[in-house]
Image (spheres, helix red, strand yellow):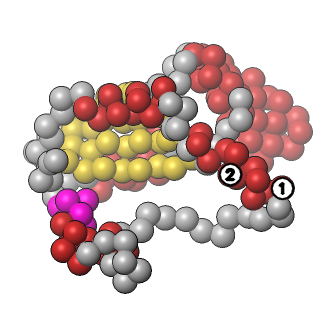
């Protein structure tokens, strides 16, 4: 399995109106081999700060085991060299087969959960950009490497003519407004 770049996206919801639309879109992207959800958490934090966490992934068991094996091998390599890589690969595959969730094992995920205001919800999506595999490989074959990445705000696209100021303001407000305006 060729593995693409991985990104963690954290989305906030003041008054969530979940009707399956987000999951359906992630499934559509998976079916077209555009992205894969490695792991996802849907989190609701009540007014007292208590968390209710649900999981989502659109990896099949075989893909999850292979991914777990690769992640475990990388961790093991960093800790114990080649011997650690082999042990990590086995442990990662076993953990994935048992349904261990990457985000719940991540200190970064728990740090983000602490930032969610009481009485709101959030979605943490750990996605693989499978569409980017051929592009990444072409860049590597050309001797290139990634220096940085990030989302560009619609406001930054006005200066180069990709958005009008009004459209950029509308999109920026939609993307960043707490409580969402829905679309």
Q: Residue at x 53, y 24 (%)?
A: 59
Along the line of sight, which residue is nearer the eye, 119 or 22?
22
Name the residue: 71% across, 35% down. Answer: 2
Residue at disc 2, secondary structure: helix
Q: Which mark is residue 141?
A: 1
Q: Quadrant of the N terminus?
A: top right
Q: Quick check: is 173 in the magenta stretch? A: yes
Of the pair 49 and 172, the residue shown nearer to us: 172
Q: Badge 2, how many Cα within 10 Å: few under 14, some, many 20+?
A: few
Instruction: Tell me the residue that label 2 is attached to.
Output: 135
On screen, residue 162 above or below 62: below
Residue 120 position, x and y percent, is 16, 46
Give x and y (percent) for residue 15. 11, 45
The secondary structure that dominates the magenta segment is helix
The magenta region covers 171-177
Asked whether, in this view, residue 89 is left or right of residue 130, the answer is right
């Amino acid at each position: 399995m060729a593995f693409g770049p991985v990104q963690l996206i954290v989305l906030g919801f003041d008054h969530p109106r979940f009707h399956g639309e987000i999951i359906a879109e992630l499934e559509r992207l998976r079916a077209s081999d555009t992205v894969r959800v490695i792991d996802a958490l849907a989190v609701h934090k009540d007014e007292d700060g208590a968390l209710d966490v649900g999981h989502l992934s659109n990896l099949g068991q075989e893909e999850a085991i292979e991914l777990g094996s690769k992640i475990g091998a990388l961790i093991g390599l960093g800790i114990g060299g080649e011997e650690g890589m082999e042990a990590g690969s086995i442990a990662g595959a076993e953990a994935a087969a048992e349904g261990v969730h990457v985000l719940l094992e991540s200190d970064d995920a728990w740090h983000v959960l602490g930032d969610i205001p009481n009485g709101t919800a959030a979605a943490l999506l750990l996605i693989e950009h499978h569409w980017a595999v051929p592009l990444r490989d072409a860049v590597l074959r050309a001797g290139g490497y990634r220096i940085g990445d990030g989302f560009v705000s619609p406001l930054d696209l006005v200066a180069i003519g990709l958005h009008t100021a009004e459209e950029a303001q509308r999109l920026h407000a939609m993307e960043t407004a707490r409580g969402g305006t829905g679309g």
